[in-house]
Image: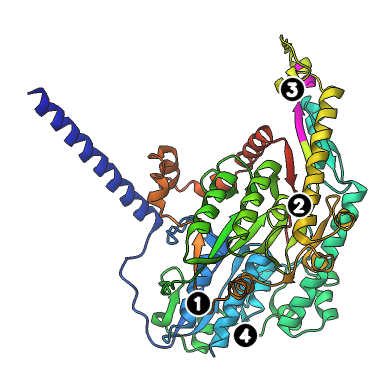
Amino acid sequence: MKAKWYMFGCLTSVILVVLLILLTINSLVKMADMPSTKAPRILNNSVLHLDLKGQIEEYSEISDINFNFLPSSAYDIIKKINSAADDSRINAILLEPQAVVAGYATLNEIIVALENFKAKGKRIYGYISNASQQDIFLLGVADEVFMNPSASAGFLMIGTGGTISFYKDLLDNLGINVRVVRAGDYKSAGEPFTRTTISPEFRRNIDRLYSERYIQLVNNLSNNYGTSFSDMQYVFERRNELFINQNNAINYGIVDELMTFERVLRRLNISEDQLVSHSKYPITETRQQMNRIAVVYALGNITSVNPQFGSANITSKRYVKILDQLEKDDNIKAIVIRVNSPGGSALESENILAKIEQVKLIKPVIISMGNIAASGGYYIAANSNYIFADPYTVTGSIGVFSMVPDLSDMADNIGINSVTIGHGKFLRVNDLFSAWNRDLERGLEIMTASTYDEFKSRVSEGRDMPLNEVENVAQGQVWSAMSALQYGLIDEIGTLSDAINKAAEIASIERYSTATYPKRKTMIEALFEEHFNLSLAKMVIKNELPDFISNPINKSIQFLQEIKEHPVQMRTEIIFEN
């Protein structure tokens, strides 16, 4: 009898688990408003509607692209553009970006796909209601650009720059001291915690970088919209209006005609049935070849801390495992690593570089730099077979800093007294309430300097540069792609496609397909990856993920975890707002 009740209990548990899974899937499907799995009927002479909005990441490991609360990925957008290019039923794209948030290197990858679409003899039309500078950059590939004629419609073009916040006064008021030791006069990642304003060295370095990017942006826009450099420069520097709308948009050569969206459809002879939303357009998967080139996306901070859902981190444990798998796979003939990282842990970066050097003995490893590949992001790239950087890549930042918080003043203010009993010169290093002392500072200086020397030696070996030349471009200085090419930090300026072609050339293969890593998974697989993640499921069902992903508190907590694990950092703190 007991056995029967036991079996009944087990069966009941299984049924309950199955019901829970089905209910979760049902909730996710309803919440995400997923379209039918049945492929939409696409008429001849249809137009793919690329209505791109908000954050666009380089790559997403979640393959459920119909979950409209998740950020879009350039990877999925590009695959749909490429599918449409080969689809005889699609003869044009209507590109309608609305406040897109993405780095210019990411946008360049989308533009390459759009240009390939046009190369098939197909047209691209653009439409603006309210647009950002990134939207205007993306629309430069369009054959014609239309704009809503309303006075409340328009777009913003403000140039190139960024804002850095300094927290020293706030921390002083709280009784918190952040002790930073740096190797490199321009290494600025710790400055927000130790200074009240930007240092002269960092100002010179970052102003040069912004100037180069600004000239490049003005030049690209003037070429794409068929205006002179001086006319485009006028738009940024001398116009009176903040938002550009109506006739000014035409006068500046950015918009061709003013008309409502409905009039544009009539003008282009596009019926409602012929306008295919990119969210419903299916991707045509290419047939896998025996010879493959692996494309590994290395995105985010380099750290030993596992990423929270929706964020991207690079851990040596995970990426060494991926590279080890690719090294042993005989079908993988070459590896392209797409690096989009400001760096992070020096130790984690060293572990990844060591694995790349090992793999390179078996098959070629090519680097494709995205929006930023600096500090630790440059470190892991330095000893590859060949390095490409996007025209808008920020790279370099060869330098090291160490950071340790000191809460002794806060402890005095709020009445905390700590006593450490034991033996050892550095016994109190983990006591945040004890005062910073010269022995600890000197010990950290030694390790920081040693890591900096190792960084320079890795660059010297990988780039075949004398150490004195490395020192000239090091010191924590950041560089544009053009300057990096001039100083020998990269081999060529180009896109991810260029890097893949180079990998095929070095591997001596002509017919091949690509395989992407880390491998993609569905939302359900993410929920059950290790065990059923109830907190994640709750956020998904309540549609709270965007707030969770962008929450600065979550990012700050993760940063403190990283510093605690690895105080010696190869990190660049540059935030480009435009």
User: Could you tell me the amino acid type at mark 1?
Assistant: Asn
Residue wearing tag 4: 144
User: Could you tell me the amino acid type at mark 4?
Assistant: Glu
Q: Are marks 4 and 3 in contact (CB under 8 Å)?
A: no
Q: Name the mark nearer the viewer: 1 or 2.
A: 2
Residue under the point 91% across and 50% down: 201
Q: Which mark is residue 82?
A: 1
Q: Nearer the viewer, residue 90 or 356?
A: 356
Q: Residues within 10 Å of mark 2 (few under 14, many from 20)?
A: many
Looking at marks 2 and 3 on the same chain, the residue that comes earlier in the sequence is marked by 3
User: Could you tell me the amino acid type at mark 2?
Assistant: Arg
SS for callout 3:
helix
Q: CA distance from mark 4 to mark 3?
A: 63 Å
Q: Position of residue 559 (x, y in %)?
A: 66, 39
Q: Taking 273 as reference, is 545 left or right?
A: right
SS for callout 4:
strand
Magenta stretch in the rendered image: 403-411
Residue 518 within the magenta-colored segment of the rendering: no
Residue under the point 40% across and 72% down: 282
Q: Taking 40 as reference, is 501 left or right?
A: right
Q: Which mark is residue 458?
A: 2
Based on the displayed image, in which of its 4 quarters is residue 394 positioned?
bottom right
Looking at marks 1 and 2 on the same chain, the residue that comes earlier in the sequence is marked by 1
Looking at marks 1 and 4 on the same chain, the residue that comes earlier in the sequence is marked by 1
Residue wearing tag 3: 429
Based on the displayed image, in which of its 4 quarters is residue 155 positioned?
bottom right
Q: Taking 5 as reference, is 270 left or right?
A: right
Residue 406 within the magenta-colored segment of the rendering: yes
Up-down relation of residue 240 to residue 539 (above or below)? below
Q: Position of residue 118 (x, y in %)?
A: 57, 85
User: Could you tell me the amino acid type at mark 3?
Assistant: Val
